[in-house]
Image: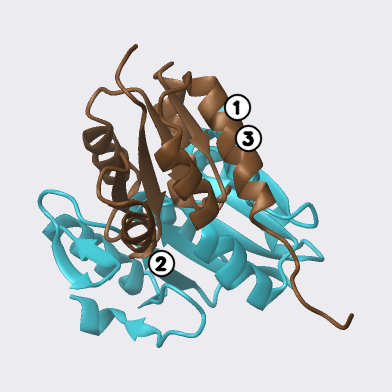
Chain colours: A brown, B cyan
Amino acid sequence: MSEPLIGVVVAHTEVAEALVGAVRAIAGDDVGLVAVSNRGCDRAALLKRIDEAVAGRPALLFTDMAGGSCGQTAAVLARARPDLRVVTGVNLGMLVDFAFHRDVPLEAAAERAVQTGRAAVVVVGGRP
Amino acid sequence: MSVVLYRIDDRLIHGQVVVGWGQRLNIGFIVLVDDEVRANEWEQELYRIGVPPSVEVIFAGVAEACARLAEWEGDGRKGIVLTGDIQTMAALCAVMPPPRRVNVGGIHARDGRTERLRYVYLSPEEEAALQSLARLGAEVTAQDVPTARPVPLAELV
């Protein structure tokens, strides 16, 4: 079996660090996630930051807004690298599930992240 | 109507532009002036992802933008004209109708630049280029989002 996938969370300001910290609080330290912030970066600097976090490993790139600078820059990197996929709209449910399911092929991991992320968004409450 | 914001932002079309300014100003179009993106359809699709269907996105090269600026200024909708660097905005300023106002929205850290604001880093050459815009009659201010204070050029350089 090859090495488990890693996840690189790329998001605005402190969002990525906070999300990864929350996953660790829930799932423990060995979650295979790295946080990258876009703070102070133009596109070239952010691309370098993400590339350094990936460090040549197969990875899912989790980004916040689909059309934001993080998602765009991650997509540019993934276009040049067949061992990377971008999943937008990152949420905590998606990341916690990923932490426990990293021993799967990249494509399957990306599809699973989309499904768990969507399933984590529900309306709760209202009058019975 | 017409062009309500001329912005320099090296992140090009992103959240601050589409959500921060776009929704506040109720825009109908965004022009991205960038020769590289103009020549790359794949990147154009990437920039369209975050823009609502009600907003038209126009990709133009620098020369094309200079030629079409009057057309956009006469558009019945409100629009944003966006460049990734000062040099491109300087080319537009030469054909921009007065009153010329230029928004510095994001020029980020790079070797040779020093920090002026959290979102504005300038090299000595870029500082001089912004001052040249002011000498051409443009009012240059830095402001990342509409709710922030517009910082006059004199405070940046």
Q: Residue at x 72, y 61 (%)?
A: A122
Give the distance between the C-alpha atoms of the residues marked 1 and 2, in whole angstroms. Answer: 25 Å
Amino acid identity at mark 3: Glu
Look at the numbered discs 3 and 1 and tell me whether their residues touch, using CB distance below 8 Å.
yes
10 Å crowding of disc 2: few (<14), some (14-19), many (20+): many
Same chain, marks 3 and 1? yes
Q: Residue at x 18, y 75 (%)?
A: B157
Out of A112 and B86, give the one closest to the viewer: A112
**For mark 2, what is the residue?**
B105
| Residue denoted by label 1 | B41
Q: Secondary structure at mark 1?
A: helix
**Type of amino acid at the residue the image marks with label 2:** Gly
Give the CA separation, mark 2 to mark 3: 23 Å
Q: Residues within 10 Å of mark 3 (few under 14, many from 20)?
A: few
The chain to which mark 1 is attached is B
Residue A45 picture location, percent across and down: 26, 44
Query: Vertical placement of A120 versus A126: above or below?
Result: above
